[in-house]
Image (spheres, rainbow, N blue to C red):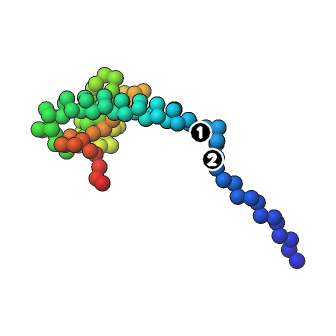
């Protein structure tokens, strides 16, 4: 006859509880991200009217620190160009249309 092994207890909770962020830290990060997005959006709104005429539906990758932007027909190519030109900096990609949205819901 085979012997049954005892069933181990189910463990619940986070895998790394020491890495849990406080509510204040989460709120601070969210505020920083929102402020950064507003800076990206301001640059986009400034250049959109002149670029939308000839490049409607193209994608624009904006580098925040310099305010430079790169455009391309393909979203992935625009992202790649921004990564190559600014390897140590963040960038944001918008679509050159009325809303700036890059995808569908």
Residue lying at 35% horizontally and 37% vertically, measured from the top left: 80
Residue ranking furthest to the top = 66
Measuring from the top left, give residue 35's x and y in whole percent.
36, 30
Measuring from the top left, give residue 20's x and y in whole percent.
59, 39
Asked if one can make out residue 70 in the rendered structure from this viewpoint, the answer is no
Nearer the observer, 6 or 70: 6
Measuring from the top left, give residue 47's x and y in whole percent.
19, 30
Question: What's the distance in space between the residues labelled 2 and 1, CA to CA?
Answer: 8 Å
Residue lying at 56% horizontally and 36% vertically, measured from the top left: 21
Residue lying at 61% horizontally and 37% vertically, measured from the top left: 19
Question: In which quadrant is the N terminus drawn?
Answer: bottom right
Q: How many marks?
A: 2
Left or right relative to 22: residue 15: right
Circle 2 crowding by C-alpha within 10 Å: few under 14, some 14–19, many from 20: few
Examine the rendered structure and indicate whether residue 38 appears above or below residue 101.
above
Nearer the observer, 37 or 93: 37
Left or right relative to 49: residue 105: right
Residue lying at 28% horizontally and 45% vertically, measured from the top left: 102
Examine the rendered structure and indicate whether residue 6 appears above or below residue 52.
below
Q: Quadrant of residue 34?
A: top left
* Residue to which mark 1 is pinned: 20
Do callouts 2 and 1 mark residues in contact (Cβ within 8 Å)? yes
- Secondary structure under the numbered disc 2 in the rendered image: loop
Nearer the observer, 56 or 76: 56
* Residue to which mark 2 is pinned: 14
Circle 1 crowding by C-alpha within 10 Å: few under 14, some 14–19, many from 20: few
- Secondary structure under the numbered disc 1 in the rendered image: loop
Measuring from the top left, give residue 70's x and y in whole percent.
26, 32
Instruction: Please report whichever mark, 2 or 1, sits nearer to the chain's N-terminal start.
Output: 2
């Amino acid at each position: 006859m085979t012997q049954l092994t005892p069933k181990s207890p189910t463990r619940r909770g986070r895998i790394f509880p020491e890495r849990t962020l406080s509510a204040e830290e989460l709120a601070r990060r969210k505020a920083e991200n929102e402020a950064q997005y507003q800076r990206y959006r301001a640059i986009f709104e400034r250049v959109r009217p002149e670029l939308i005429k000839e490049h409607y539906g193209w994608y624009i990758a904006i580098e925040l620190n310099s305010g430079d932007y790169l455009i391309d027909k393909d979203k992935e190519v625009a992202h790649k160009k921004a990564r190559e030109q600014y390897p140590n900096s963040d960038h944001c990609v918008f679509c050159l249309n009325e809303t700036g949205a890059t995808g569908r819901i």
